[in-house]
């Protein structure tokens, strides 16, 4: 098949004379009555077609910083210490979300090599190390190192015809993608002739479609589209394609609350926290302080290669008087930056903002009142089962402990607002990376806290336990039953699959301090964590955690207690895909 296509591409073709004027060409009709216009492979129209069908390498500039090529999926990167796998364009937003989640002076991204890159002509190259990638990236000039046309696309399929030296049609090729079209034209000799079946549909960057009926109309449409949109070939992935009009509208749409102020590397947040700034379309800005006093000033915006600039001038608020670079625009948040350690973070306050949420001091007291049991902890979509049932204690002076009843890890904790001004719990625990994170609060009730970053699939769910549920009559009774001697697995089923035999001969001994030991013929083979609790829905739960310990890892879960007797307990776990049943009985 490849030889046949090559024969079609390299067949002798009729030579034509080209005169390109005002983005149009003179096209030659092919003899034989088929009324088809042809173009040569080295014509300006063919060049426009190649540029429009080239592989766009700018969409992943946040990773490689080069518009001339793109990394081939899947690949793995480490972003601010978090390792993630990139399988699609959508996953690239995860990188920006991580950069945005924690406000640091320098975001760090490391690519795990080797990787494969795809060039503009869809050629693939394996890259073994960072130095090799940098050498190729240096050949791309930021802001236009690639010469592709991204503001308009072909709608496929497209039919192409080839001709021999006698003006006779020799072949017909249907292309179904940019890659096929780009490779077709790249395979032609300079004077080879090809024609296109019209009408042809094109889709512009704004979603509108246009239909062209000739080579001249096609050339005009592609040429006109070259400068019609921002191809976003730079590395400024935080600009969110704001233009001056959109920025001014965003600024004047609602009042803004001051959340952080740093001037000359010194924090002034306490002085200005919760001041309200209102920007008017006439260039005036009013600031209301916490006592209700009003201060007046002016504002102006401009655009540079670095992005939007916001100039503020006040008679009294001298810490605000600067030309600020708008270095990030997020959901309801604007971050302003200026050299020499100056920063302001503003949170948008619109009338449709959600209702009241607890303040930092309220959440701080809630956490310190009781212990908190991990019901779920998820990092990048993967649940960390080894932490199921572990207990947090949030102690005074910012100390936090995490225990399974035998071993205890210690770290620090604090409450504050993240970059998006969401109330968050920051946990730092060096020997337990699974909980090291800035956790935004999403849900709070009397017995449960849920923290989540949906964009990168991080989640932490904590159940409140005061005095170890000693005042709940059922919980202590069930615990006493379980600690009354050895237990065996009488049944373990995943849906209809009976897997009971995998636990034959194993004795389970549930002891105080929430420890469970598994032995065979009195020889210990594994240890884990167990807990009996009443959850936020007033249901009795049985936590079992053997981590990833071979077969026993199958039992790691938070189980509902379906029934309990002196010599038998039946546990159920349900999710979207299965219903598991676990029955313990005394021998």
Image (cartoon, grey):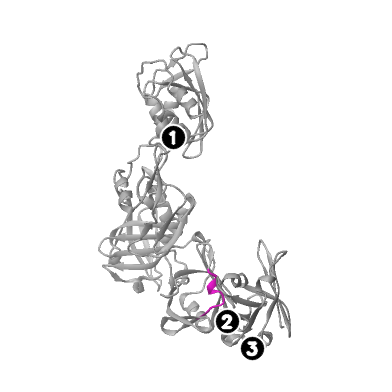
- Tell me where residue 134 appears, x and y as whole percent: 31, 50
- Disc 1 versus disc 3: nearer the observer: 1
- Tell me where residue 523 appears, x and y as whole percent: 59, 82
Q: Nearer the viewer, residue 324 or 241?
A: 241
Left or right of 491: which side holds 321? Answer: left
Please report contact status of discs 2 and 1: CB closer than 8 Å, yes or no. no
CA distance separating discs 2 and 1 = 65 Å
At numbered mark 2, what does the secondary structure look like: helix, strand or loop?
Answer: strand
At numbered mark 3, what does the secondary structure look like: helix, strand or loop?
Answer: loop
Sequence-wise first label, 2 or 1 = 1
Label 1 neighbour load within 10 Å: few <14, some 14-19, many 20+: many
CA distance separating discs 1 and 3 = 70 Å
Compared with residue 121, is residue 307 higher up or lower down, i.e. above or below? below
Left or right of 314: which side holds 210? Answer: right
- Tell me where residue 348 appears, x and y as whole percent: 44, 61
Compared with residue 369, is residue 550 higher up or lower down, i.e. above or below? above
Label 2 neighbour load within 10 Å: few <14, some 14-19, many 20+: few
Q: Which of 569 and 398 is in front in this view?
A: 569
Residue underneath mark 3:
471
Please report contact status of discs 3 and 2: CB closer than 8 Å, yes or no. no
Residue 524 tag number: 2
Q: Give the range drawn in magenta.
A: 384-392
Compared with residue 207, is residue 474 higher up or lower down, i.e. above or below? below
Residue underneath mark 1:
53
Q: Quadrant of the C terminus?
A: bottom right
The number of numbered badges drawn on the structure is 3
Quadrant of the image occupied by residue 277: bottom left
Compared with residue 431, is residue 29 higher up or lower down, i.e. above or below? above
């Amino acid at each position: 098949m490849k030889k046949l296509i090559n024969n079609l591409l390299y067949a002798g073709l009729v030579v034509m004379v080209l005169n390109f004027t005002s983005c149009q060409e003179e096209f030659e009709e092919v003899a034989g009555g088929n009324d088809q216009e042809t173009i040569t492979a080295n014509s300006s129209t063919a060049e426009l077609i190649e540029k429009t069908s080239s592989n766009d390498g700018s969409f992943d500039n946040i990773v490689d910083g080069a518009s001339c090529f793109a990394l081939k999926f899947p690949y793995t990167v480490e972003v601010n210490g978090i390792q993630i796998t990139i399988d699609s364009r959508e996953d690239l937003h995860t990188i920006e979300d991580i950069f945005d989640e924690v406000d640091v002076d320098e975001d760090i991204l490391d690519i795990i090599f080797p990787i494969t890159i795809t060039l503009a002509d869809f050629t693939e190259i394996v890259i073994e190390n960072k130095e090799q990638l940098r050498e190729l990236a240096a050949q791309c000039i930021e802001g236009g190192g690639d010469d592709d046309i991204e503001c308009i696309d072909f709608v496929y399929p497209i039919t192409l015809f080839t001709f021999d030296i006698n003006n006779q049609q020799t072949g017909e090729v249907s292309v179904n993608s940019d890659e096929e079209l780009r490779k077709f034209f790249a395979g032609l000799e300079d004077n080879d002739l090809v024609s296109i079946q019209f009408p042809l549909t094109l889709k512009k960057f704004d979603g509108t479609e246009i239909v062209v009926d000739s080579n001249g109309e096609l050339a005009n449409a592609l040429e006109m589209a070259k400068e019609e949109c921002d191809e976003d070939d730079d590395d400024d992935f935080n600009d969110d394609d704001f233009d001056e009009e959109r920025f001014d509208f965003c600024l004047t749409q609602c009042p803004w609350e001051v959340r952080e102020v740093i001037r000359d590397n010194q924090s002034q947040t306490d002085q200005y926290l919760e001041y309200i700034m209102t920007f008017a379309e006439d260039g005036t800005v009013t600031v209301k302080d916490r006592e209700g006093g009003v201060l007046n000033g002016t504002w102006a915006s401009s655009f540079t290669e670095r992005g939007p600039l916001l100039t503020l001038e006040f008679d009294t608020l001298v810490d605000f008087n600067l030309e600020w670079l708008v270095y990030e625009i997020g959901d309801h948040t604007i971050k302003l930056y200026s050299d020499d350690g100056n920063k302001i973070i503003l949170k948008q306050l619109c009338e449709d903002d959600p209702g009241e949420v607890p303040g930092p001091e309220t959440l701080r007291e809630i956490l310190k009142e009781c212990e908190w049991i991990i019901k779920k902890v998820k990092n990048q979509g993967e649940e960390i089962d080894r932490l199921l049932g572990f207990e947090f204690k949030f102690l005074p002076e910012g100390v936090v402990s995490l225990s399974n009843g035998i071993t205890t890890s210690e770290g620090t904790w604090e409450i504050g607002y993240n970059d998006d001004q969401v109330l968050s719990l920051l946990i730092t625990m060096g020997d337990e990376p699974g909980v090291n994170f800035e956790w935004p609060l999403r849900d709070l009730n009397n017995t449960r806290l849920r923290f989540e970053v949906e964009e990168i699939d991080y989640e932490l769910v904590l159940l409140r336990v005061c005095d170890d549920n000693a005042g709940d009559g059922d919980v202590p009774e069930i615990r006493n039953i379980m600690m009354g001697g050895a237990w065996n697995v009488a049944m373990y089923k995943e849906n209809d699959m009976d897997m009971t035999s995998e636990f034959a001969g194993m004795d389970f001994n549930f002891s105080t301090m929430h420890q469970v030991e598994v032995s065979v013929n009195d020889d210990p083979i594994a240890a884990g964590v167990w807990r009996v609790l009443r959850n936020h829905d007033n249901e009795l739960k049985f936590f079992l955690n053997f981590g990833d310990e071979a077969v026993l890892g199958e039992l790691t879960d938070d189980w509902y207690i379906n029934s309990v007797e002196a010599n038998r307990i039946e546990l159920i776990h349900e999710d979207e895909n299965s219903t598991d049943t676990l029955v313990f009985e005394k021998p």
